């Protein structure tokens, strides 16, 4: 085809497609924000695991280079990525045997949160993963609190703890946990949580209703993993049976218009973790994730990492990927930072201090 004929087949002007601008991670780090959905279990970096495994005399379950490759883990029972991933967390936490190691893990966690510009964290800890501490859970909490206190003395960011039940536990185990929380008031614990695999546990929230009511009466806040491997019914149960103040994940609420309206009306926050949902197979691709659909329906959503070390990420990296994938600008991210502060269980003074850093005059552009 002659050159002028080719030219005549081209559009006169290029289509007006604005490439999404990647927002600088340094700018995201500087935004005052909290993280409300992140697990201590999901914060062992490879080097931490190598040190702990050596100290415990335990072999690695596979080559170091692919240790965090969830898809290579054994799925022999056919239960899928989340169940395999939770078993991997059991192995990791099972390597922590001494109070010094537990305190060090908490300290390191606070340092990593600080490095991501996270001014306050509600960190989830589920003692059922920490096999060496069965029968001595108070000592584990003492050690974690000591690590977090030392971190704060060293100028690192504040971290409080959410004591998490596992969905497979019994009603009486759950009650015993809450009675201990109520009577012992372990340092740093601000909330009761429940996590684990909703699909393999079945629809069991009712079993935990008594424990969550007891926790509420004792002044603990309440956060519930739901709407991850369960559908919207898991989120309804968390709200109606467990009186959840916050939902961890909750993304499958997008499938139920009545629930969406309810979440928008009540502003019960969803601690959403897009990367976790994609890696663990809830959505095939970042572009399929309902983060922005939920936000645009008026739901109070925050962006979190869940388990950043095995997922190979940081909060600022995930916010940047969200910005790029969904075409979000700086104002959107300031909105997510504001939502994270409101959704947290931080005290009013901490919330006010973080909020003040989001005033237009305090922000660089
Ligand atoms: N514990 C750690 N990560 C989790 C997840 N994504 N779902 C349920 N429980 C968890
Ligand atoms: Zn989680």
Image (cartoon, grey):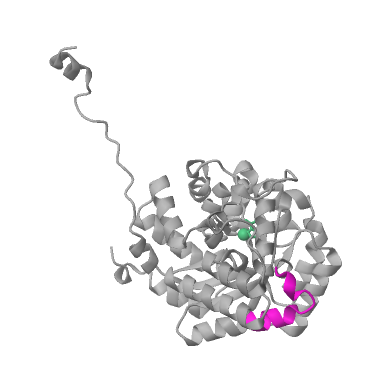
Q: At 53% from the left edge and 73% from the top edge, which residue is drawn?
A: 109
Q: Residue at x 60, y 47 (%)?
A: 71
Q: Which image quadrant is residue 50 in?
A: bottom right
Please indicate, yes or no, whether residue 72 appears anywhere in the rendered image: yes
Give the quarter of the figure containing the C terminus.
bottom left
Q: Is residue 143 magenta?
A: yes
Ligand 2 quarter of the rendering? bottom right
Where residue 41 sits: x, y (%)?
62, 66
The image quadrant of residue 139 is bottom right
In this picture, which residue range is highlighted in magenta? 130-144
From the viewer's perspective, is 305 left or right of 170? Answer: left
Q: Would residue 217 be found to the left or right of residue 289 on screen? A: right
* Relative to 328, residue 180 above or below: below
Q: Residue furthest bottom?
A: 153
Q: Is residue 259 above or below residue 90?
A: above
Q: Position of residue 35 (x, y in %)?
A: 52, 66
- Residue 56 position by quadrant: bottom right
How would you classify the magenta stretch by its main secondary structure? Answer: helix
The picture places residue 34, in percent across and down from the top left corner, at: 49, 68
Visible in this render: residue 187? no
- In the rendered image, the quadrant that contains the N terminus is top left
In the image: residue 130, left or right of residue 251: right
| Residue at the (73%, 48%) spot, across then down | 199
Percent coordinates x, y for residue 264 in the rendering: 57, 53
Q: Nearer the viewer, residue 308 or 234?
A: 308
Q: Spot the residue most to the top.
A: 1
Magenta region includes residue 16:
no
């Amino acid at each position: 085809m002659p050159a002028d004929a080719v030219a005549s087949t081209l559009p006169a002007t290029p289509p007006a497609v604005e490439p999404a601008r990647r927002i600088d991670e340094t700018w995201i780090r500087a935004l005052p924000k909290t993280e409300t959905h992140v697990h201590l279990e999901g914060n062992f970096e490879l080097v931490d695991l190598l040190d702990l495994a050596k100290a415990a005399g335990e072999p690695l379950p596979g080559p170091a280079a692919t240790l965090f490759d969830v898809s290579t883990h054994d799925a022999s029972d056919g239960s899928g990525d989340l169940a395999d991933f939770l078993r991997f967390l059991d192995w990791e936490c099972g390597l922590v045997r001494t109070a010094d190691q537990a305190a060090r893990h908490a300290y390191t966690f606070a340092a990593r949160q600080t490095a991501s510009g996270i001014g306050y964290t509600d960190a989830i800890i589920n003692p059922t993963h920490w096999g060496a501490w069965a029968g001595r859970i108070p000592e584990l909490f003492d050690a974690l609190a000591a690590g977090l206190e030392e971190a704060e003395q060293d100028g690192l960011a504040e971290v409080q703890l959410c004591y998490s039940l596992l969905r497979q536990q019994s009603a009486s185990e759950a009650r015993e946990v809450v009675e201990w929380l109520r009577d012992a008031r372990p340092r740093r614990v601000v909330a009761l949580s429940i996590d684990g695999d909703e699909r393999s546990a079945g629809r069991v929230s009712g079993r935990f209703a008594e424990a969550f009511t007891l926790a509420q009466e004792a002044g603990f806040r309440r956060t519930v993993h739901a709407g991850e491997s369960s559908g919207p019914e898991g989120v309804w149960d968390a709200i109606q049976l467990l009186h959840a103040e916050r939902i961890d994940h909750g993304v499958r609420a997008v499938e139920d218009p009545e629930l969406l309206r309810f979440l928008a009306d009540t502003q019960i926050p969803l601690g959403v973790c897009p990367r976790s949902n994609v890696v663990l197979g809830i959505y095939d691709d970042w572009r399929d994730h309902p983060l922005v659909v939920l936000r645009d329906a008026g739901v109070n959503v925050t962006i979190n990492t869940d388990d950043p070390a095995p997922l190979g990420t940081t909060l600022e990296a995930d916010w940047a990927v969200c910005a790029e994938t969904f075409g979000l600008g700086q104002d959107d991210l300031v909105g997510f930072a504001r939502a994270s502060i409101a959704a947290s269980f931080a005290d009013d003074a901490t919330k006010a201090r973080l909020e003040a850093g989001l005033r237009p005059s305090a922000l660089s552009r």
